[in-house]
Amino acid sequence: MEGLSEMENVIEEPLLSKQNSNPKGGFRTLPFIIANEAFERLASLGLMPNMILYLTRKYGMQTAGATNFLLLWSAATNFTPFIGAVLSDSYVGRYSMIAFGSIASLLGMVLLWLTTVIPLVKPVCNQFTNSCSNSPTTIQLLILHSSFALMAVGAGGIRSSSLAFGVDQLSKRDKDAGIQESYFSWYYAAVAMSSLIGLTVVVYIQDKMGWAVGFGIPVILMFVATVSFFLASPFYLMVGVKRNMLSGLAQVLVASYRNRLLQLPQEEENGIYHHEKDSNLLVPTEKLRFLSKACIIRNPLQDLTPDGRALNPWNLCTVDQVEELKALVKIVPIWTTRIMIGVNLSQGSFLVLEASSMDRHVTSNFQIPSASFGTFMILSLIL
């Protein structure tokens, strides 16, 4: 009975408790964060598959040129989250980064949608022969490139900070109750479901109802994503920026090199490693021990200030900084396993072009959109 009572308190506290010492954050903010990410993925993935057809048929681009353009857009979309993560952790904070990314993505999709409804912003093309009477002008290409650039920047702002921002809302009690694990599960489930809907429903609308309606749907979805995020702004818990992450990692590398001649102490010895106040990490781990030399205190009188901080952070780092770099190094092999998968998935434009020349009719009144053929690869991976 006691265990049941504790679980009821854990579930009710984030939603109903008025005596919580911190009225911000908690479980109530998570649905808004998940909705922002899910609708952003649904909007962007709904645009991507058919884009090769739009560029070749409405802008008169050659297949090779349009494919290279989309590959560069995909590369930028996958690289900007790295920049966004550095900026959010070191300078502006996660809330500001997600807010900026949401607005940038919305503006980019609106600009792209305008190319379908305003004739002057794209070349004059024959809808039956898919040939254009003239090449796109500089202004027309500038508008097109600006829309894609805004969407790539927006994706970097949202995807770099969304998951971590949700974790910021949870207290230690929430994490101990398993809410963090549930949040991760719902987050990735929402992203996966959004991907499937974008590759099926949204591209089907584009095929059946035209580009104006098909590109207008992602605009509405991105507007919903932006509004859902800002609706919970009064309840978000804002975690302040602590330090520059990149400079901290660089300090560990420099300090470990400068201290490379030092002998590592025995494992049972402690008190000679520099650590932050109230930190749970008092000694470094045994992995990648050469980096542990960066946090060895050689002479407390020369290395530390009276309040216990390092006089020169490029000669002496904290255990936390060392372990952050070690964690990053450990992730690199896992990250590299996705390189070849990414290469294969990036060839989706060729799949769409090939499928568009096939007989895709399932019945006399229904045919599978050529851009939906990517779902078969996703389903095969699931199965």
Image: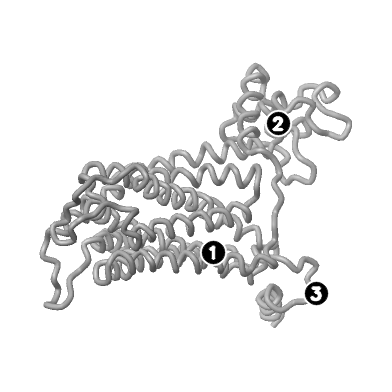
Q: Is residue 51 above or below residue 231?
A: above
Q: Label 1 is placed on what type of residue?
A: Thr
Mark 2–mark 1 Cα distance, whole angstroms, equals: 40 Å
Q: Does 93 sit above or below residue 180?
A: above
- Which residue position holds label 1? 226
Q: Amino acid at mark 2?
A: Cys
Q: Which mark is residue 317?
A: 2
Cβ–Cβ below 8 Å for labels 3 and 1?
no
Q: Residue 19 bears which disc, if any? A: 3
Q: Where 101 sits versus 228, above or below?
A: above
Q: What distance separates the C-alpha of mark 3 from that of mark 1?
A: 31 Å
Number of numbered labels in the structure image:
3
CB atoms at circles 3 and 2 under 8 Å apart?
Answer: no
Residue 194, how many percent across, how many down? 40, 66
Image point (18%, 61%), residue name: 127
- Residue shown at 80% from the left, 24% from the top: 303
- Whichever of callouts 3 and 1 sits on the residue coming sooner in the sequence is 3
Q: Residue furthest top?
A: 261
